[in-house]
Amino acid sequence: MAEYWYIAEGFEEKVQSFLTNNGESEVDMMFTVPEKDFNTAGKGSSEVKNLLKRLGVESGVLRRIAVASYEAEINVAAHSQGGVMHSAVFDDLIHVRFEDEGPGIGDIEQAMVPGFSTADDLVRELGFGAGLGLPNIKKNSDAMHIVSEKGSSTLVEFIIFFA
Amino acid sequence: MTLRDIVTLLEGEVLFPEADLDRDVPCAFASDMISDILMCTKEPTLLLTGLTNNQVIRLSDMIDLTGIIFVRGKRPLEDVIDMASERGLPIITTKFTLYRCSGILFNAGLRSCKI
């Protein structure tokens, strides 16, 4: 499997410490994201944002989390055969994982190039397919990780700290 | 500038009657691509677009939209109007094109949003 890592400057230690500590999350939320279902796509991200708003997360951080999560959720609906979104809220951060059932990303580096898109006509008609999904997740995240290969499943996960 | 001023300038039609048109609109963004619109994370923004599907309303759950102007005479379906109404998100349709709307509002002093 091919792998892609991005960690924002200055966050290396915090991310490393989160990944090695394996702490328990305070709240977990799980949503299924069906293939090409644009009536429900985005609901998971809305609900996660509402929860974090109630928990008092600052509005700028909240918007970054919502945008990264929504882009990833739409990616699963638009490009995969369906998948799940799992959000784990910790004291100081949120960790959101999207795992789908394929068909995988052939070239992750290329998929990260702003403007590159493989969206079909249905997806484009709805206003998606700008080729900014993965770049927008990266832009809004403190850490982002992708594991995929052609013909296999895809994992996209990101971490955003609350302060 | 308020939404009411904008409705007048664009000869718009407000799509649900309870919409709050007295809210202040500091800036605007125009696009038909959802990922472009998601770049507006810095401040409350008026959106001008030709997209009328439910995901345009869903966007307002993620970023802070002061209202949506549907251009080129586009009109969303009833369930999309309901989604906006539930969120208290004013939606307006105008027969003007995206380019013309942007020009009118820019000349009237409405600035572009920060991205």
Image: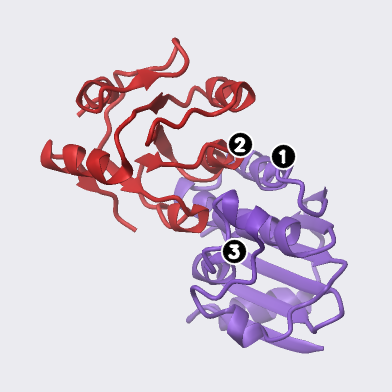
Q: Check disc 2: other Cα within 10 Å, few if <14, some if 14-19, many if 20+.
A: many
Picture colour scheme: by chain
Q: Residue at x 40, y 51 (%)?
A: B31
- Amino acid at dot 3: Ile
Identify which residue, A55 or A2, lies in the foreground: A2
Instruction: State which mark lies toward you, 2 or 3.
Output: 2
Identify which residue, A118 or A39, lies in the foreground: A118
- Amino acid at dot 2: Asn
User: Which residue matches tag 2?
Assistant: B54
Q: Residue at x 71, y 78 (%)?
A: A146
| B101 lies left or right of B40 | left
Rendered view: A57 above or below B12: below
Callout 2: chain: B
Tell me, yes or no, if residue A110 can be seen here. Answer: yes
Q: Secondary structure at mark 1?
A: loop
Q: Check disc 3: other Cα within 10 Å, few if <14, some if 14-19, many if 20+.
A: many
**Residue A50 x/y as whole percent:** 63, 38
CB contact under 8 Å: marks 1 and 2: yes
User: For residue A101, what is the image quadrant?
Assistant: bottom right
Between marks 2 and 3, how big is the CA–CA gap? 27 Å
Rendered view: A21 above or below B17: below
**Residue B96 x/y as whole percent:** 29, 34
User: Which residue matches tag 1?
Assistant: A39
What colour do you see for chain A? purple
Check the picture and name the quadrant holding the N terminus of chain A: bottom right
Q: Check disc 1: other Cα within 10 Å, few if <14, some if 14-19, many if 20+.
A: few
Instruction: Give the chain letter for red.
Output: B
Residue at mark 1 shares a chain with residue at mark 3:
yes
- Amino acid at dot 1: Asn
Which mark identifies residue A160? 3
Q: Residue at x 60, y 21 (%)?
A: B78
Callout 3: chain: A
